[in-house]
Image (spheres, coloured by chain):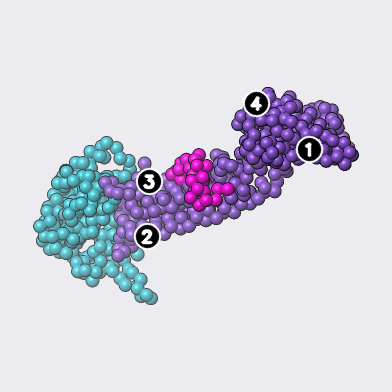
Amino acid sequence: MSDSVLTARALRKTYRSGNRRLEVFSNVDFHIAAGESVSIRGESGSGKSTLLNLLAALDTADSGTLAWDGCAKTGNAARGRFVGIIFQAFYLIPELNALENILMARRITGRIDPAARARAAELLDRVGLKDRGHHLPSQLSGGERQRVAVARALMNSPRVILADEPTGNLDEKTADSVMDLLLGICAETKTALVLVTHNPLYAKRTAREYFLHEGTLRPVR
Amino acid sequence: MPWYLYLAFKQLFPSGRRVTFFTCASTIGVFLGVWMLIIIIGVMSGFGYKYSRMIIDTQGEIQVRGTFIDNQEQLRGIIAKVSGVAATTPSAEGIVMIEYQKRPNYPGIIGVDPESVEKVIPISKYLLQGSMDDLDDDAVILSAGLAYALGARIGSKVTVVSPLTLERLNQDTYMMPTELTVAGIYEFGHQQLDKSIAIVTLRRMQELYGLGDSVHGINVRLAPGADADQVARAINETLPAGSRMFARTWMQSGEAFLFALKIERFMVIIIVAFVIVVVAFLVTSMLLVAVARKTREIGLYGALGATPWQSAMCFCFQGVLVGTLGTFLGVTIGLLTLSNIDPIARLIARVTGNWDLLVEIYQFTKVPAHITAPDIAIICVFAVGMSTLAGLIAAFRAAKLKPVEAMRSE
């Protein structure tokens, strides 16, 4: 726990449904160390994405604490630097080409300088899209778009990558290649990875595995 | 450049793609509104400006009028001492019959003092032919319309008969018609003044009307920067008590017409300003559609570290950029149109066949255009302000979106 980059304690999340409150989960503890990879599985609607949103401070818990690098400050600007988020639906900005989409992560959190451009180009090369930098998202395949999203998540050298079913929209072969890339880069750069997935094979490739069921996060191994 | 401004640019002008429909429609809307405002304000102000210039150039800034002014030299001396007065000239007016080659006409006639008139009424500026130097007691300067109606040219000898002839006939005496040589032809660009006016020397006019040394008025030119109302008040205070003379400014002379123009200008501006308001609604609705369409993208900005305020700015700036671009195009093309408004108006009038009617109503033989920097500044601030407001409404909607809810939206 001492080298934990992300720590969540006793998280509780409920949603209001009419006059009732539905509990998604309660008393969830979670931590991840630098360079470690953890997967979270669970049935649809079990609250995996909600948990990931809480870990990214995109949503607020009803109770519990969250700390990034031991610090409870989890504002917008800090999120952009500390966390890299990958979504199932890629969420690339359609008006920007691949390189501009990757640079967008830096634009929002800081300034674009030659070093940032060099890093974006290097990441584009790393995800195997060296020659597709000036292509718009509409000109890229699903796998290529997710590779761009991976590069964008890594642009600010975050401490943690939060990936929410990153292969959910991809065919098996493409999904495998994206997973290879994601796990490889995270290991290479010592970036912690929290992977939400339905696929047990991908879950097995992470160092630790959790299962979210009926509001409880249970370690599988 | 802040990312939201960069993204606003990119969303309006995407990389490697054609300009979006939103950009085109919104920019054209703002452009058309501003273009129309520039032209309408330019033309309406042009009529007012031209009319003012015309009054000043034909009568001076202040006119002192009385039934008969006998001691004009003395009076001019008094007026000249009033602060703000640059020059004075006497004049007399009436109606005569002019005949040339059995073509009679009944124009207005003005008698001017050749020595002082140019300092107050710059007739030379409007002379199409001839010279003021040739205006002596045996010469006449005709307006272009009058010369055309008579068929007279420079050097033509016209016969002038004044009402005094009839008066003399009643007294059983006969006054010979006066023969004058045409020394010049002028055009002020105002239908009424160019239609039927003759200018002679003051001495000839006094003779034609039997005025002796009297004149009908004294026209005053002011020093640059002098306030016409103030100077007119000062002159009225110096005029001899009970003289039945009074000084009035050029604004009072054309008060009714200038007021009508002002009201007309105001009404048209209000109507056209509503066009810009309608365009602002168009921009708002398009930006609101964009916000709805990009809801999940707005959630992404938050996930990448943007604050709600920054995401909102992205849409606000789109309104600002569309407004600025549309206004720039509107002002540029509007000014270009204004600089060629006369040939354009003539072309339209030729097609619709109502040029004569236009001249009849507005009196000017050329469509005038005059727009000032403050007018342009007000139009720019109004158009960009409305577009910014349109962007702000969409931005407010975007700012209210929470990243998680935005990304979950379908």
Q: Position of residue A41 (x, y in %)?
A: 18, 64
- Foreground label between 2 and 4: 4
Amino acid on which disc 2 is placed: Val
Label located before the other in sequence (3 or 1):
3
Q: Residue at x 63, y 42 (%)?
A: B191
The disc at residue B5 is: 3
- Foreground label between 3 and 1: 1
Circle 2 sits in a helix, a strand or a loop, which is it?
helix
In 3D space, how far apart are the residues under numbered discs 2 and 3 (Cα atoms)? 19 Å
The chain in purple: B
Quadrant location, the C terminus of chain B: bottom left
Q: Quadrant of residue B329?
A: top left
Name the residue at the front extreme: B102
The disc at residue B289 is: 2
Circle 1 sits in a helix, a strand or a loop, which is it?
loop
Say whether mark 3 and mark 2 are on the same chain.
Answer: yes
Circle 3 sits in a helix, a strand or a loop, which is it?
helix
- Foreground label between 2 and 3: 2
Mark 4 belongs to which subunit? Answer: B
The disc at residue B131 is: 4
Q: Residue at x 48, y 46 (%)?
A: B347
